[in-house]
Structures are given as structure tokens and as C-alpha cells.
Amino acid sequence: MNALGFPILSLMLLVPLVAAGVCLFVSNNTARWLALGATLVDLALGIFLWGAYDIGGPQWQFVENAPLFGRFSWALGIDGIALMLIMLSVFLMPICIAASWSSIEHRIPEYMAAFLLMETLMIGVFAAQDIFLFYIFFEAGLIPMYLIIGIWGGAERIYASYKFFLYTLLGSVLMLVAMLWMVNFAGTTSIPVLLQTDFPPEAQTLLWLAFFASFAVKLPMWPVHTWLPDAHVQAPTAGSVILAGVLLKLGGYGFIRFSLPMFPEASAELFWLVMGLSMVAIVYTSLVALVQRDMKKLIAYSSVAHMAFVTIGLFAFNRQGIEGALIVMLSHGLVSGALFLCVGVIYDRLHTREIDRYGGLSDNMPAYAVLFLLFTMASVGLPGTGGFVGEFLSLLGAYRANSWVAFVATTGIILGAAYMLYLYWRVAYGKLDKPDVAAMPDLNKRELAMLTFIAAVVLWMGVYPESFLAPMRNDVGTLLARIERANPGGDARIAMSASPKPAAVEHDGNVPKAAEGGH
């Protein structure tokens, strides 16, 4: 039991799990409404959790701990970073249910149950405070997404689902071996205790590489990204939304929770591995996106490029970079999800994702064109949107660590503008000379509500990012205090200056006011 007097995190896990079980025994329409109701209840609990979170309080809040057997325990608790990622999950989930309302026509109860199970597992990853409990949630999330792609996906869904499953599962085998060694060394499975454990420097490199094998696939990083375009193209619209919106963030969360604070010396030693792969990813996948003819595949490749900004920010080892990486994770989760919804809207009408089949949609679908333009500009990083805040801070952090990394990353923004604006121009502008395209109706009320809600949060994040940065700021300070030994050179020594008091980080002259929320 925590300070609230009831186990709110366990309740947030239980609500969708129970609803998933009930969904299997009800009619199609009842399953839809039950899934929507359960996800809205979790969203309400998440909003309450955000409101009750004490920004100036201890690092771990809403802690629950019930020993089960041996060293394993049901241990839950969140910090500000986990809070924001849980909020992203519970916000997108009812939108995914709404997006599937009419497009999914067979095995609807099973489909809704899979999404509800996915919600339980995603929240569990961010809330787990036992390392083996984290691993169970982390790996179990493969199962419902594998089923969603394999059963309700496109023509090549079996190939895409197997590729997704094998890539992500094989990457995690080494991580489990590393966890077993860590627990044996530290004598505990508690993540908060492991975060304070100093592992031998000679062992850190192997441990870091073992975790990297899993997190790099999940993120995904080049060259282990090839499962993502296939998974996105074959997945149903809502599957693509939750895959890009939340599941890709599990890799970034893993770097923040394990790789950086637990293995700081190894993080410094392998700094250039991450930066090198990230720079290649930004340029290469942006160029690949430029020549795509399938809208989903273009957005999938753009996701790889955008997630490279996350790794560049995290491994800049400074406040601006880490805060920027976190905002990129949140913003990309919203914007990429919205872009996949935009693709789904016109796919439901014309049943093709071929870019050349469209054109002139701004004439007969003006509301769609306006919202699609907003999300396109947010993906490019237009000031006033969350994408700008995250990419600006990530680049600032990268520049302070190494100016060449920042230079290469900046080319990714230019290429991103090229492929996203080229996509929008081909879809929304030009002559409306295809009869079937001209007959497409504009957004209905359900579609308009889904996209408007996301648009409002994207603009909120861009105009007042302090709302999202404030809960995470002390935790970024705690992380910096832990990794301050990791100095890969350049300006990182100055940039890594952090408060000696992790729970209440003081801002000093080394941190520009922009990093304190005045973006």
C-alpha cells in the first residue's frame, strides 16, 4: 500500500487485464464498448496519478511491494520518467480502440482483448521495480502484438509477425543472462537497489552489450531496424499506432533505466558506437524514406530516424540532451501515431497506401488536410509543436558533447522536411482528377475527435513543455549524478554538471534557462 491508501498501479494493471478476459465471452459490439470503457478508466486513473505525483518528493512514488517467492516480488513504483510514459500509453490506447471501431470486421472480441492485454503489459514495463518482473512485462508485450499483426494484418502478415517476434525475442536472450549475473552479484532483484550498485568496470562492458542487444532492436537502431517497416506495413492501423507510439519507446526507456545509470563506465567507453549508429540511422533511413511509394513504409523509416535523436540525446551525457531525448520520445509517440491514423483514414476509404493514387485531397477533405498538415509539420519540427522542443534540446545536448554529431543530426532534420513535405504535397495538393479519390468523404466525428485530441496535446507540448519536463527534471538530475563519471570528452565535462542532491536538483550557471523549461 502506498501513500494514496490504495494500490493505484496494480489497479491500472488489473482494469484492462480483467476487461480483456471478459471480452473473450461477449458479442462484437459489447467487446468494443467494454474495451473503450476499460481504456478510458485507465486514462482517468492516469490523470489522477499525474495530479497526485509530488514533483518535489522522493524519486520513487506510489510504491507497492509484496514478496512472492525467493528474491522475486511484486514490486511497483514510478518516477517522473515512468509517469510520462505511462500517460502516453493510457492516452493512446482509447484512441486505438476508437480507430478500430469499424475497420476490424472479424474476431473482434479477440482483437480487443489483445489490445487490452497490451495495455497491461506496457504499463507494467514502466512501473516494474523488480528486474525479473520488468523482464516478464518487457518480453510478454511481444505476444499480443505478434497476434495483432499475424491475425489482423495485411497480405504478408505471417512473414512480418515472425520477423518482428524473432528479432525482438533473440535480442533479449542476452539481457536475461546479464540480469541473472547482476542479481547474483548484488544479491537483490530490486531495480532501485541495482541502480545504486557499482558493478565492476571489467564486467560493465559485457553487461552493457547484453542489454544493448535487446534495447537496440526495440528502439530500433540501425542496422537491426529492418523488422519495423514490415511490421508497420502489415499491421492494422491501431497496431501501427501503438507500435510506433509506445513499443518503440521501451528501448529508450531501457537505456534510461539500465544502460546509463547501471553501467556508466561502459556507456562512456561505447559512446561512439551509439553515436555512430545513430548518425548513420538519421541519414540513411531519411534517404530511404525519400524514395518510398507506400505511406506507411515512409512513416516507418521516419520513425527510425527520429528515434536516433533519442539515442544521440541520451548519450550526450548532459541535461539538455537527456531532456530533449525524453521529449522526442513523447512527441514522436503522439505525432507518429497521428500520422498512422491519417494513413488509416484514407486507407479505409480507398484501400490503398500507394502515394501516387492520391492527390488533391485538400479540395474534398479540408479538415483532414489541415490536421494532416499539422502532424506533418510537427514531424518536421515546426516551432510551436512538441517535435521542435525535443529535437532542439537533443541537438543542443549533442553539440555540447560533439559538434560533428550535431552537424550530422541536423542534416536529418533537413531530409525529414524533404520527405514529409514531399509526401504531403503528393497527397493533399495537385489536381483532384481521380473519380474515386474525389468521392472520398471528409473526416467523420469519430475520426475528427481522435486526431483533434492528439493535435491538442502536440500543441500543448510545443507551447508549454514545462508541463512534461517538470515531473522528469529531478529524475534527469539523479541520472546525471549517477553517470557523471562517464566523460567521453569534448564539452561533456561541463554539460554533466548536476546537483549533489539527486532528489532535488539545483540548476546552476552551466545549464541554460532553455533547459529549465523556458523553451
Image (tube, helix red, strand yellow):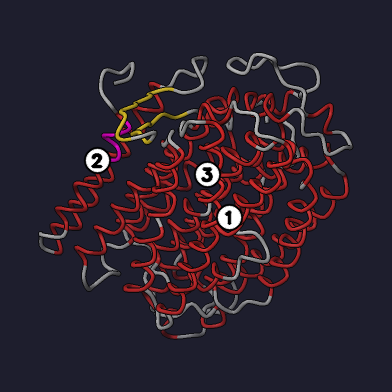
On the image, numbered disc 1 is attached to which residue? Answer: 219
Q: What amino acid is labelled 1 in the image?
A: Leu
In which quarter of the view is residue 71 placed? top left
Q: Reading the chain from its start, which is encountered first: label 3 or label 2?
A: 2
Alpha-carbon neighbours of circle 2 within 10 Å: few (<14), some, or many (≥20)? some
Residue at (73%, 52%) from the top-left corner? 274
Separation of marks 3 and 2 at Cα, in angstroms: 27 Å
Specify the quadrant that holds the C terminus.
top right
On the image, numbered disc 3 is attached to which residue? Answer: 179
Of 235 and 104, nearer the camera is 235
Q: What amino acid is labelled 3 in the image?
A: Met
> What secondary structure predominates along the stretch shown in magenta?
helix
* Foreground disc of the pair 3, 2: 3
Of 15 and 300, nearer the camera is 15
Q: Is residue 269 magenta?
A: no
Residue at (19%, 46%) from the top-left corner? 18
Magenta residues (range): 9-13
**Res. 310 visible in picture:** no
Alpha-carbon neighbours of circle 3 within 10 Å: few (<14), some, or many (≥20)? some
In the image, residue 300 sits, relative to residue 155, either above or below, namely above
In the image, residue 351 sits, relative to residue 34, either above or below, namely below
Report helix, strand or loop for mark 1: loop
Report helix, strand or loop for mark 3: helix
Separation of marks 2 and 1 at Cα, in angstroms: 27 Å
Badge number at residue 453: none
Report helix, strand or loop for mark 2: helix
Q: Position of residue 113 (x, y in %)?
A: 24, 57
